[in-house]
Image: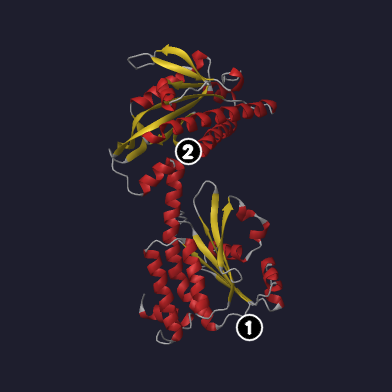
Amino acid sequence: MPPDDRAAAISRLQIRTFDDALGHRIIGTHMWAVREGLRSAGAYELFDGYCQRLVIDGIELWRAHLAMETLHPQWSGYGYTWRRDLNAIEPQQYVHGSAEDADFLGSPFNELIVRAQGGEENPSLRRRVEQDDQRDFPILVEFFAAGATDYLAYLFEFGKGGDRSQGTGIVYSFVTDRRGGFSDDDTTLLQATLPGLSLAMKAHAGYVIASGLLGTYLGEDAGRRVHAGSILRGSVDTLRAVIWYADIRGFTTVSDSAPGPVVVELLNEVFEILTASLRVHGGQVLKFIGDGMLAIFSFEERDRAETCRHALDAAIEAMRNIDEMNKARATAGLPVASVDLALHLGEVLYGNVGATDRLDFTVIGPAVNEVARIEALCEPLGCAVLVSAEFVAGITGADDRLKSLGRHALRGVKEAKEIFALELDGGDRPRRPET
């Protein structure tokens, strides 16, 4: 920064020297934020630590809040509220569309965002809420009724040009109940140290966004491995796993006869039901392949039988919930889904496969091909759920719900394989609904 600009910035912050008590507080808090950012402290820890330092430095802080946007399919952002009466942080998550709520549109935060969108750089706002004409936002009326005297809000943008890879920015508010409001030293300390805190917050936001997106698009375990550094092509681990392969039978017919949005809504509903059963029972979705889904339940040998039982329970739960979904959709006059499912057990290679500039973190091996071939038998055998003899052996105990259908040839597999059908309570096999 040129000397004239630096002098102007210092003048705006009312900092005469860094050698006095205020200067030492600024330097100490700034260095603390830098150190915490370098050691990858989380947003919760950063904001709690910052508020604690403000209190130690003599600011009579009553309440503080921050909010940040994020990139996540479920959440548009997250926030943290510090309260003196609790001496603790309360986290929040914001669903998509919450920024359109009337409460937010009428808030000081929205005012700062509008001003930033209009070109104002890092806008701020102050309201001395003790004064009647300063309570021009509903939330300030609430704060005043609870004893607040002064309100400060700041917005710091991340990047330029709409890059949302680390969020678009961060907004803060600070409230005091000190008679007369915040002192000049208080506001100077905040203005001088919030940029350093925001940079540490940005570092954490980037980590959270990357972690969330990798988990969403690759699966929780695969995403965690990639984020931890498993990125070399050809680097794979050998796993013992139950392999789950599901497919919507006759989906081409459905997609040809229904509008695109209706087809997507059906796919999402089916995949959510299948994935929900996996979440509960410990399975990991690896990928959605058009109208199909590949998942695994990895295990150590000592846990093989228990893992097989979890996979079977997940299949039963999924198929029953698909049946309930189809009944509801049929009643509403919507297309239904015929889901076939196969379970197999075997050894797979789990890791990075692909081209130098386009990798996939997945499973490969004969067992993966075999489970797809077993699923293809569901339609000709009239069963919705088929399992392999290897899977049945993995349970290490008789299960009356699994009935042998004899040996069947699998395309591309040398020897015929014994195939078992899953029968639900009452002896009925899950079958595909009539369409």
Q: Quadrant of residue 308?
A: top left
Q: Residue at x 41, y 23 (%)?
A: 393
Q: Residue furthest front?
A: 397
> Crowding at label 1, few (<14), some or many (≥20) Cα neighbours within 10 Å?
few
Q: Residue at x 44, y 41 (%)?
A: 219
Question: In what element is the residue under mark 2?
Answer: loop
Residue 165 seen in the figure: no
Q: Residue at x 69, y 72 (%)?
A: 146
Eye-nearest disc, 1 or 2: 2
Q: Quadrant of residue 335?
A: top right
The reply, left or right, for residue 195 in relation to residue 118 is: left
| Pointer 2 residue | 282
Give the camera-side residue of 385 and 67.
385
**Residue 266's x, y, as percent?**
58, 31
Residue 20 seen in the figure: yes
Mark 1 and mark 2 in contact? Answer it, CB < 8 Å: no
Q: Residue at x 36, y 38 (%)?
A: 361
- Report the amino acid beneath label 1: Gly
**Residue 122's x, y, as percent?**
50, 68
Give the camera-side residue of 105 and 352.
352
Q: Which mark is residue 246?
A: none
| Pointer 1 residue | 180
How many numbered circles are shown?
Answer: 2
169 to 397, vertically: above or below: below
- Report the amino acid beneath label 2: Gly
**Residue 165's x, y, as percent?**
44, 53
Task: Identify the image quadrant of the C terminus.
Answer: top right
Q: Quadrant of residue 61?
A: bottom right
> Crowding at label 2, few (<14), some or many (≥20) Cα neighbours within 10 Å?
some
**Residue 245's x, y, as percent?**
45, 27
Sequence-first tag of 1 and 2: 1
Task: Identify the image quadrant of the N terminus.
Answer: bottom left
